[in-house]
Image: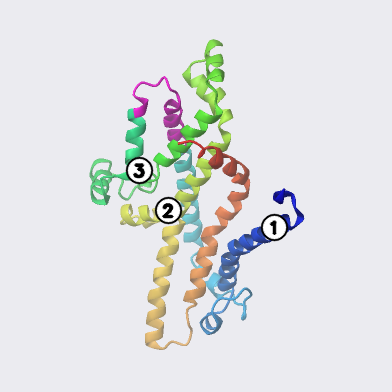
Amino acid sequence: MIQNSKIYRILMSLVMLFFVFACLLPFALLISGSLSSESSLKAFGYTLFPREFSLEAYQYIWTTKSAIFRSYGMSLMYTAVGTIANMCMTFMFAYPLSRESLPGRKVISFILFFTMLFNGGFVPTYLIYANIFHIVDTYWGMVVPYLLMNAFYVIMCRTYITSNVPNEVVEAARIDGAGEMAVLLRVVTPMSRPILATIALMSAIAYWNNWTNGVYFIRIRTELYGIQNFLNSVMNNVTVLSSHSSSLGTARQIPSTGIRMALAVIAVIPVLIAYPFFQKSFVAGITVGSVKG
């Protein structure tokens, strides 16, 4: 067969190498740009290797190291709490929907799917969070809105459980005297580790990259900023300082372009570190969880 031929394997290997290169190229340009001088970036643009090696961007960012470490800690806290809460709510919602004996199962599934298509809009949502739940300028303003649970995750988790947790296993556990919580924790959860890892990774990335909640719900208490909001404020300050320095004709030029690249490197490092540990379960979970609707 053609799949077993040597030429086919070579061609597929070349295609995969091309895609790997296409994925790695932006990161290489990003790191190279963060290590290049401002003058070389403006003169030559982005290159795979720095034409003029410089650490000015990182030195400028290091002047705010205490704030960066605080923002890193806040983001780690938001990500940990939000991811755990998201996993628990998603799994406890998906498991009952996967059981055909649940009364009103189709109606609940329709309502869940309906929320993926329509919502109340930004203004009513903001008013509810601000005036009813009072989460503005609080820790929960960075955790609760928009990210605490996702209908797509619930559907994906429900599909995985339906496809990979046979009813016979659940019934056998009940015959042995296990209640619903025991079945959920001791039978369904161990068999659902790939999809749980998938949800954990997707939720963690969403929380780590989130900056809109900080813009909408953090007005005064900027010490609650996560790393994304802090880096955004640094970038805005750099833009203002660069415009003032150019208008005043000051000799020292602020490396605004290099700082943007360095900020992106700082923000993406935790994701690059975490992804390899979840990759195997992520691929298995999202593949099996999307087989059926």
One can see residue 251 in this view: yes
Mark found first going from the N terminus, 3 or 1: 1
Residue at mark 1: 13
Can you tell which quarter of the image residue 165 is in?
top right
Q: Is residue 261 above or below residue 78?
A: below
The answer to whether residue 149 is visible is no
Q: Residue 210, which numbered label? A: 2
Residue drawn at the location 54% of the way across and 61% of the way down: 266
- How far from the left and from the top, in percent, is residue 240? 37, 75
Q: Residue at x 55, y 32 (%)?
A: 192
User: Where does label 3 land, which residue?
Assistant: 116
Judged left or right of residue 45, residue 138 is: left
Structural distance between the alpha carbons of marks 3 and 1: 38 Å
Residue 102 lies in the magenta stretch: yes
Choose top left, top right, bottom left or bottom right for residue 287: top right
Q: Amino acid at mark 1?
A: Ser
The 10 Å Cα crowd at callout 1, few under 14, some 14 to 19, many 20 or more, is: few
Secondary element at image label 3:
helix
The CA span between labels 3 and 2 is 19 Å
Region in magenta: 87-106
Image-based side of 146 in relation to 169, left or right? left
Label 1: state its secondary structure. Answer: helix
Residue at 47%, 45% in the rendered image = 203
Callout 3 amino acid: Met
Mark 1 or mark 2, earlier in chain: 1
The colour style of the image is rainbow
Between label 3 and label 2, give the one nearer the viewer.
3
Where disc 2 sits, the SS reads: loop
Q: Quadrant of residue 247?
A: bottom left
- The answer to whether residue 235 is above or below residue 177 is below
Residue found at x 62% / y 80%:
51
Q: Amino acid at mark 2?
A: Asn
